[in-house]
Amino acid sequence: MEDRLNQIAERLRQVERELADPAVYSDQQRLKNLSREQKELTPVVETFTALQQTEQAIAEAREMLSDQELRELAQEELTRTKEQRERLAEELKRLLLPRDPNDEKSVVLEIRGGVGGEEGALFAADLLRMYTMYAERRGWQLEIVSQNVTELGGVKEVCATVEGDGAWSRLKFEAGTHRVQRVPETESGGRIQTSAATVAVMPEAEETELSIDPKDLQIDTFRSSGAGGQHVNKTESAIRITHLPTGTVVECQDERSQYKNKDRAMKILRSKLYEAEQARQNAEIAATRRSQVGTGDRSGKIRTYNFPQNRVTDHRLTGDSKNFNPAAVIHGDLDALIDALTLADQARRLQEGYEKGE
């Protein structure tokens, strides 16, 4: 491992030398890639350096044990530095875990009202607002591509893009079935109802990552419509693209321009096909080892929003760390929850590494 860490340290020095060269600013893509690499490598090298310093401190404390006057002080220092070494070693293992290659990508987000009728649609609308507010907190841009709304303002289904660095690394944990328990606005008797909505999250695929044969596409145009099927414009600017080999259908009606709608619809289609191919590969490689955290499995209940008991429970977490404040969560304060899921995912992957003897 030490050889690998020394190579990482040397690579960081090389990246920093390249970033110090004024010529790099003439190539914005290279500048972005180098800056991102620097951001990834720096905590690894800093932790490695701290671990080396701790090893030196342990050696010095052991030498002091032979001095009768300093023995007690040296023993205290030895105990403290050994604990520090253990913490740093674990942190280093976490930092060296293989990164998800999609982590820095933007995402395609789909929300559908599930069981519960109108209340399920209203809950789906709440989730859309929650992710919109979270995107604002993170400095991302969320844009609705298409949506089917109800007369009461609920959402039967909505497709949106979330653009920004690291969107996938955070939102990938949101995929699955979200359940809500509360007294619906439509309930006059004050009875608590359980409803649900499903969330799908897909990394946005680049054209270079997935090639689509135009012959495999059926493209239809139609008029955009609003709530209750009401037409919102008189031109056929909305686009429906069907990928004939898979039967995948994507619609986009948010833009007034047919060209823009087609461009955005193709992005969504590309992401859906990319996700399907990744899922197929993952199933072949590690079907029995995939956990609910981060799999994007829509069928599993991942979270319950229990308003009468004033808690949001994420069922992938355990102990006290699984419950969160519903008012904060539903208003887009998701970082604490997602941080907990990230740590749980890292712990699982570390455990798998131990079991394999890595």
Image: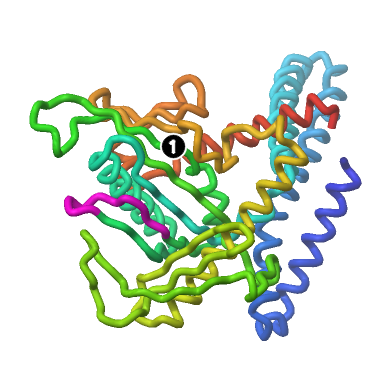
Q: How crowded is mark 1: few (under 14 residues within 10 Å), some or many (20 or more)?
A: many
Look at mark 1 in the image and give the residue it sits on.
177
Q: Position of residue 288 (x, y in %)?
A: 71, 30
Q: How many labels does the image show?
A: 1
Q: Does the magenta stretch include residue 326?
A: no
Residue drawn at x 32%, y 74% is 223
Residue 294, compared with residue 154, is above or below; it is: above
Q: Is there any visible trace of residue 325 in the rendered image?
A: no
Q: Quadrant of the C terminus?
A: top right
- Farthest left residue in view: 188
Residue 203, compared with residue 325, is above or below; it is: below
Q: Where is residue 247 in the image (x, y as percent from the top left)?
A: 56, 58
Give 295 or 308, whichever is nearer the viewer: 295
Give the quadrant of residue 255: bottom left
Residue 204, compared with residue 221, is above or below; it is: above
Residue drawn at x 32%, y 50% is 156
Q: Position of residue 161 (x, y in %)?
A: 46, 62
Give 111 or 29, whichever is nearer the viewer: 111
Give the quadrant of residue 180: top left
Give 289 or 238, whichever is nearer the viewer: 238
Q: Is there any visible trace of residue 263 in the rendered image?
A: yes
Answer with left or right where residue 271 lies relative to residue 30: left
Q: In which quarter of the image is the N terminus?
A: top right
The region drawn magenta spans: 150-159
Residue 278, compared with residue 288, is above or below; it is: below
Q: Does the magenta stretch include residue 155?
A: yes
Residue drawn at x 82%, y 60% is 11
Answer with left or right where residue 358 lies relative to residue 256: right
Q: Assign a secondary structure to mark 1.
A: strand
